[in-house]
Image (cartoon, rainbow, N blue to C red):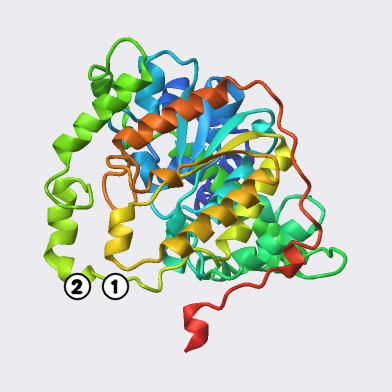
Amino acid sequence: MKKKLWMTFGPLLIAGAVFLFILFGPSSIFGGVSTSTVKKSATSMNPAVVQGVAIQQKMLATDKTYVPIFGSSELSRVDRFHPNVFTEKYNRGYTPFLIGRPGTQSLSHYLDIKAMGSELKGKKVVFVLSPQWFQPAGVDDGHFGGNFSPLQAYKFALSDEHPTAERRYAARRLLSYKVVKNDTTLAALLENIASPGPKTEVDTFTKTAAVTQLKILQRKDDLDSKFIQGSREEKVQKNLKLLPDTLDYTKLDELATKMGEEKVGPNPFFIKDSYYKKKLEPTINQLKDSRTNLSYDESPEYSDLQLVMDAFKEVGADVLFINPPVNGPWYDYIGASREKLQKYYDKSGKQVTEQGFHYYDMSSYSDTPYFLEDTIHLSWRGWVAIDKQIDQFMNDKAKPEYEKTPKQFYFNQILPPKKEDNK
């Protein structure tokens, strides 16, 4: 009888024991993250890297030469002037580690920064803004959901931090997205954080389910960290040969101008010819004056940016914010208001500089050829200018002195209505 019971339930018990060991056992059983994996990950912008924790923590903890660069799709444009090529060619003593993907914006980066925690203390960090992030409704469900990290979100929700105004507002922002609301356990944790008044404990079942889910996500992160694909290291190595051996920014800018001239066709917007012919030329007449209502001066992205800055302040990171130019001739063609655009640069620049962060405003280059390769993405001369600015920042030894965020700031923020709410 006992033998039959063992034959029936034994395998299940063994499988359960193995599962619990994998789930709650030490991370070292997976061998950890290797230095070669970190190197590949530096240019991969792979979801497992951007939405994970293990590789980024390894990068920060074991190699002090890596410099996290937060941004979005512009980081993927690797040409000979890209920061990863520039720093290796000229032995600058640091290596950019790219954190971002198309559609990644401040709120996703906030969760990432919070997940890194004290590992960012004293680190030099670069954060590249994008004007198009600052839409009236902020990041939409599609882009936020596509870049959402359940692991980073659960770490945030299960943190023992005090219920500050910042933390409550962040929870409210997260709860405005479908991908968060659809996870009932995570939503329950965030609703508890977002609610005003003294912090209360969630029920035991929800807490147990959340802790278990976090463990599962951490183990998934450990496993995903073994198989990183999409590294742009080959592109970096290929482009190293195309730069002059001696660093001279004037000559680099001249070379970038020449490359831009070769890539741009006869279109009046200084846009890469291949992109223009494929993406714009077929509908060019319909696009004229099509964005007269385009505006970046009012957006919840400003509050999300404040979350990012407060997270950096908390850990003591030394941060350079970069505000890239737009394609001025293209903005004129689609009927966008230059006045409204300048309001964005003034507002975002003031928000960053008044709180003590380093800031590089590139808006004066919006009408300068070859800083962008299309309507929005940095390239050629734009990268040369950024290379120089980052290098100066890296050699600045002064410690940042940040201003505290007024307590009432987050209390005054009203979440924008979702499109579906207006139906």
354 is higher (above) or lower (below) than 344: above
* Residue to which mark 2 is pinned: 286
The three-letter amino acid code for the residue at tag 2 is: Gln
Residue 306: image location, x then y, percent: 65, 53
Q: In the image, what residue occupies the spot 82% across and 53% down?
A: 162
Helix, strand or loop at disc 2? helix
Q: In the image, what residue occupies the spot 37% across and 21% down?
A: 249
Is residue 34 found left or right of 208 in the rendered image? left
193 is higher (above) or lower (below) than 235: below
Helix, strand or loop at disc 1? loop
* Residue to which mark 1 is pinned: 290
At label 2, counting other C-alpha atoms closer than 10 Å, the crowd grade (few under 14, some 14-19, many 20 or more) is few
User: Image quadrant of residue 315?
Assistant: top right
Residue 16: image location, x then y, percent: 57, 49
Residue 195 or 375: which is nearer the viewer? 375
Do the CB atoms of the residues marked 1 and 2 lie less than 8 Å apart? yes
Q: Let me know if residue 13 appears in the view.
A: no
Q: Find the residue positioned furthest to the right.
A: 198
